[in-house]
Image (spheres, grey):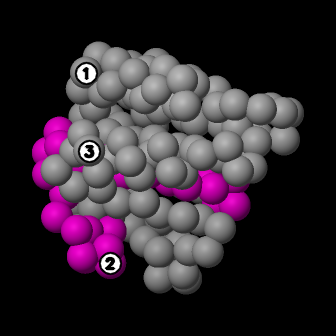
């Protein structure tokens, strides 16, 4: 429990310090609570949240990433409609969970962060991490 509390504090620090100008990457072994932590953080700290789970993402979701990635207004509009979730400037969190299953999503993070409108967390299973969760931030853009 203490570990989760410390990680949650790091997430709060990232949120207040980045103001949408950087993405966050959580890595850790399967089953350590990355997804749970992201959902808890998003529901408590943001007005809205979308969690895209790439381990079972539909073709429709994958198509949004494939075909609408160059038109960010369309991208966000379709993502919002698909999840029936309003996205608020600087008060929405979008989590890409199990991003190792869809590398294109990870490549897009830099472009998605450029607008500084939303906060992003990527979560992926890391086979080299035996226990715990590792947090790293992208450099500010």
Residue appearing at x 66%, y 36% in the figure? 27
Give the total of numbered labels.
Answer: 3
Residue appearing at x 65%, y 67% in the figure? 55
Residue appearing at x 61%, y 74% in the figure? 56
| Cα separation between marks 3 and 1 | 14 Å
Report the residue marked by disc 1. 16
Give the residues in magenta: 78-103
| Cα separation between marks 2 and 1 | 28 Å
- Is residue 101 or residue 7 the one in the foreground? 7
Q: Residue furthest front?
A: 1
Element at badge 1? helix
Q: Is residue 89 above or below residue 80?
A: above
Q: Position of residue 109 (x, y in %)?
A: 46, 43
* Magenta highlight on residue 48: no
Q: Is residue 37 left or right of residue 28?
A: left
Q: Is residue 106 left or right of residue 72?
A: right
Label whose residue precedes the other's in the sequence (3 or 1): 1
**Mark 3 burial class by Cα count in 10 Å: few <14, some 14-19, many 20+:** few
Q: Position of residue 66 (x, y in %)?
A: 51, 68
Element at badge 3? helix
- Which label number is shown at residue 82? 2
Q: Is residue 43 left or right of residue 55?
A: left
The quadrant in which residue 120 appears is top left
Element at badge 2? helix
Label whose residue precedes the other's in the sequence (2 or 3): 3
Report the residue marked by disc 3. 44
**Mark 1 burial class by Cα count in 10 Å: few <14, some 14-19, many 20+:** few
- Say whether residue 129 is visible: yes
Q: Nearer the viewer, mark 2 or mark 3?
A: 3
């Amino acid at each position: 429990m203490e570990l989760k509390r410390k990680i949650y504090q790091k997430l709060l620090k990232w949120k207040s310090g980045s103001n949408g100008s950087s993405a966050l990457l959580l890595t850790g072994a399967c089953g350590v609570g990355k997804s749970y932590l992201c959902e808890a953080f998003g529901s408590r700290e943001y007005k809205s949240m979308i969690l895209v789970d790439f381990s079972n993402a539909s073709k429709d979701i994958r198509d949004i990433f494939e075909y609408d990635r160059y038109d960010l207004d369309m991208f966000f509009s379709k993502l919002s409609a698909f999840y029936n979730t309003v996205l608020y400037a600087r008060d929405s969190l979008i989590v890409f969970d199990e991003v190792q299953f869809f590398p294109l999503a990870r490549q897009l993070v830099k472009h998605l962060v450029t607008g500084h409108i939303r906060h992003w967390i990527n979560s992926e299973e890391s086979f080299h991490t035996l226990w715990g969760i590792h947090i790293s931030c992208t450099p500010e853009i």
